[in-house]
Image (tube, rainbow, N blue to C red):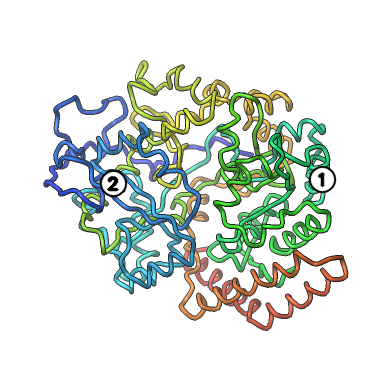
Amino acid sequence: MRQTRKSFHFLIVMLMVVTLALTACSGGNGSGNSAAGTPAGTGSPKAGEATAGTGADSGEPITLRLLIMETGSKWNTHKDSEVVKAIAEKVGVNIEYVEADENKFNVLLAGGDLPDIVRTDVNKFQKQLIEGNLIIPMDDLLTEYGKDISANINTVVDYSRKNWSNGTGKLYFLPPQVQSKPGTSISPITIGPTIRWDWYKEIGAPEINTMDDLLDVVAQIVEKHPTTDDGKKVYGVSMWQDWGLWPYVIPPLTFTKLSAASSDLTAAAVGGHEFISTLTDESSNFWVAMDYYNKAHRRGLLDPDSLTMKNNDYMAKATAGQIVVGPATWAMGDFNSQHAGDGKGYLVVPAGKLAWTGAVNPIGWQDKAYAISKSSKHPEKAMQFLNYIFSYEGARTMYNGVEGKHWNMVDGKPVLTEETLALKAAGGAPFEATGMSLDRNIIGLGGDMINPNDKQPVDLFTSEEALAKAATPLEKDFAEFYGASYSGQVFQKQIEAGKLDTFTTWMNGMSDEEIIKRNTVPGVTLPEDRKKQEAELKELAAREAAKIILSKDEAAFAKNKQIALEAFKKAGAEEFTEFYNQEVTRIRQEHGL
């Protein structure tokens, strides 16, 4: 159950107000300039005032190119959003995403000429990036341009120097979404079985306790809706293949409560530290997924493009309404925004054993850590941009929009305007176009972090009042069906009744200090030989998965499964897991656990 805990005083420090004198920077592709934040409520500088980090001191904003290990992001499609304009005004930069899957990312690393800022998995790539002299230490830049970072996430800075510096003791990486404790309410859930709610409601919204139950639901829906309104074929289940093993290790998590850490080849119970082999343990997410997709194939529910399709192609099908169930709301393309006014759309529904309600991340999302490229022509600007995303002012703007337009200070507290709440409630393209919460991976502070200047969460949409008022028609219909006021409350009731666990359930009853200690254990960093072995095993797993999923019957499935298990063992999957567990034990002991 999500509980309110006393503040982590040593993690949340009073905001420091700093004015930075910036030298003029020329235009072109380069790094960004993020100003130190000011306390919420002071407002933006008045017209004509040259303020630290604004475009006023350097002419036109500089374009910073940001490399992300993802495809299908929406940031570049909203270059004129009010959030983007606010960043340009305050920091003097425009951010342009450069998307890459893991293969393209490795090609870029080999080439050495990287975009200005790199967002990547720190545990997997710190050694390659640092030893390859591809990124720069931020220490000197932090002193001059990173006052909000030092004030607000100094624990992360210290941790990064100790654990993510490849033994140099320098600061190279800063992960986003630093979240010291869970909030008191549940925002709309974005990861889990994501179903066309209008179709699911139509068949009575039967309980989904297992992935077999999920397939039965999908089959009923496909029988009723074999085609879309414009005649396209509807597929029950689909996936994409340019995110590695993601479609095999993430969708089953809700049902297995098994989660990977710094390698997809191992997994442990949420909150646990004893890892099993993803490839050779038949209870793993991978094998649960194999069973699920093969049954979907044999029942005629699997999209035949599933084993060759890329993420963008998948999202295009979802946007067209051709997929019944997906793994996340953000994976379903633009269907919801295009149908915001007619009550149709995809929502995560209660299923299995776990609800993805968010987690405690005192050191942020390690697989999305930011670093400044050696190739950047404007490292000072890059540092100032990073400082902005970790400031309370920057985080609040990126979550909630512009003060004076989207929210106001009322009696010393920030309050969303009725117009903003109505815009969020209407949903669809108009709200998305504002840029609010468009990509949480680019926001340094988690939404439930408390701004010490006004004692409110940086994400104002997380209050129960805002969640109820800002619910879309789709979310309201979903909530009312389950007797709740907003969608997150549907899950909250089931959590309180003991029907679902969360990513923080295992922390219940722990002291603040114990929670911090157990959530700051360093992840396993693989040496080069293990990284090579990991890559080979993942490629082998992808090849074998295709054969297993397309098995024509149970006998063929059993045969292909056995062949794969033997191949995985021969390739060293179990030795890899043994090494991984030894490292976990060593690191935990060094951490005092």
Q: Secondary structure at mark 1?
A: helix
- The residue under the point 47% across, 47% down is 73
Amino acid on which the number 2 mark rests in the picture: Phe
Amino acid on which the number 1 mark rests in the picture: Ala
Q: Nearer the viewer, residue 22 or 303?
A: 303
Residue 509 visible to the viewer:
no
Vertical side of 544 occupied by 310: above or below: above
- The residue under the point 42% across, 67% down is 125
Comparing labels 1 and 2, the label whose residue is closer to the camera: 1
* The image quarter in which residue 112 lies: bottom left
* The image quarter in which residue 348 lies: top right
For mark 2, what is the residue?
385
> How far across and how far down the image is residue 139, in percent?
24, 58
Image quarter where the N terminus lies is top right
- The residue under the point 45% across, 61% down is 121
Decide if residue 533 is on the left or right side of residue 321: left
Label 2 Cα crowd, 10 Å radius (few <14 / some 14-19 / many 20+): many
Q: Nearer the viewer, residue 93 or 546?
A: 546
For mark 1, what is the residue?
219
Which mark is on residue 127? none
> How far across and how far down the image is residue 216, in percent?
83, 46
Residue 203 visible to the viewer:
yes
Q: Nearer the viewer, residue 289 or 182?
A: 289
Q: Residue furthest bottom?
A: 570
